[in-house]
Amino acid sequence: MDTNYYIDLENRFGATNYKPLDVVLTKGEGIWVWDVNGKKYMDCLSAYSAVNQGHCHPKILKAMIEQAEKLTLTSRAFRNDQLGLLYEELCRLTNSHMVLPMNSGAEAVETAIKAVRKWGYKIKGVPEDKAEVIVCEDNFHGRTITIVGFSTESAYRDGFGPFTPGFKVVPFGDADAFESAVGPNTVAFLVEPIQGEAGVIIPPAGYLKDVRKICDDNNIVLITDEIQTGLGRTGKLLAEEHDGIEADVTLIGKALSGGFYPISAILSNEDVLGVFMPGEHGSTFGGNPLASAVALMALKVLIDEEMIENSAVLGEYFKEGLKDMDSPHVKEVRGLGLFIGIELYPKAGGARRFTEALMADGILAKETHDNVIRFAPPLIIKKDEVDWALERIGGVLAGG
Ligand SMILES: *Cc1c(COP(=O)(O)O)cnc(C)c1O
């Protein structure tokens, strides 16, 4: 069976909500993936940072198989012997006091919005149905109706209304704009420490610190969406650490399973997550023993194998290497840890032709919006592998 056979199957029977690069992958190991013809590629997307630990990490695989042979799903009607262990480890690592497990990132965001609304009514004393959550322009928090309703990207929202009320949008990276938008019924500020989907947009230094203070001064819950930036991607366990702050609610997902299984978590404290009483929120698969065992091991290898440190060191090396490249197309190279974006000049004609050329050269990277190429390889990448990538990226971006 060749590439076109699989592409044709997808095109004939699949919904058309993606425009993937036409590479059909069949195997992955570490930072490498192979297509159905046996051609090898370096994965510089890591499934949008879900595969930070590398493809098919053997220890996570082993944990998954062992747990799958014992017990996979109990529902939360009963307890299981893995979930508590995951709670304890997440709290220990992130200094949280209460955890709520879900499956996808969007569900974690939805859950956080439910929690802060209820907190607003029960604790802050906001009048019924008046709670307001402030979000940022160019945000990406997932794809549910409520979430796309407060997106500013027309492709995400057009044709999907009517939307959930109760959200206000302010520019990203502008703490004064946030402060001006605060009203008596503001219950929370939801923000990505670095905007990934918007094109690896890094806010001014100290932004989160300023935002933290404004939230404290106004009794507002600070929610950081670390679904993409968390778990080592930026060279720290959580990106908020770069600003030396702690959010009240932190959302993680993606790499929480090392790419094996959908699992997300809301990390917070009794004050916020304590608002949920039995029956008020739930998920059939959330907190299942298979997901918990996988996540426990995914966290363990992230720490034990020093992937976070590697992300900091090789991220800097990768970024400097990209900056040293001689290319007429590159407007800016920016990033933190192994979370790097190259912004091209509009006259370069869009990033897509470069990601296609990189694919031909054995590097899989994805354009985000029209003019940014994101480089986010698994955090286990080595220096000589970065050199290998830099040589090819340099070749592709040098061309006319
Ligand atoms: C991917 C992502 C989400 C949504 O996660 P899903 O698992 O796709 O629902 C939310 N927020 C951020 C910052 C993300 O990168």
Image (cartoon, rainbow, N blue to C red):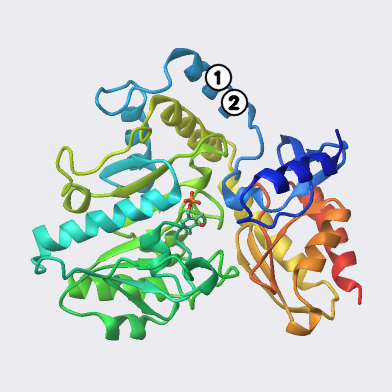
**Is the shortest distance between ligand 1 and the CB of mark 1 under 8 Å?**
no
Horizontal relation, residue 86 to residue 314: left or right: left
Whether residue 194 is visible here, answered yes or no, is no
* Figure check: 37 above or below 311: above
Q: Is residue 274 left or right of residue 142?
A: left
Q: What is the x, y in percent for residue 215?
A: 25, 71
Q: Are marks 1 and 2 in contact (CB under 8 Å)?
A: yes
Tell me the amino acid under the disc marked 1: Ile
| Label 2 beta carbon within 8 A of ligand 1 | no
Q: Is residue 64 left or right of residue 168?
A: right
Q: Quadrant of the C terminus?
A: bottom right
Residue assigned mark 1: 65
Which element carries disc 2, helix, strand or loop?
helix
The answer to which image quadrant residue 134 occupies is bottom left
Within 10 angstroms of label 2, few (less than 14), some, or many (20 or more) residues? some
> Which residue is rendered at x = 88% and y = 54% of the image?
361
Q: Give the residue at mark 2.
A: 61
Which residue shows up at 12% across the image and 62% down it? 121
Classify 325 as above or below 358. below
Q: Amino acid at mark 2?
A: Leu
View extreme (top): residue: 70
Q: Which mark is residue 398?
A: none
Instruction: Tell me the quarter of the image containing the N terminus.
Output: top right
Could you tell me which secondary element the residue under label 1 belongs to? helix
Q: How many marks?
A: 2
> Closest to the observer: 229 or 385?
229
Please provide percent x and percent y for residue 312. Answer: 60, 56
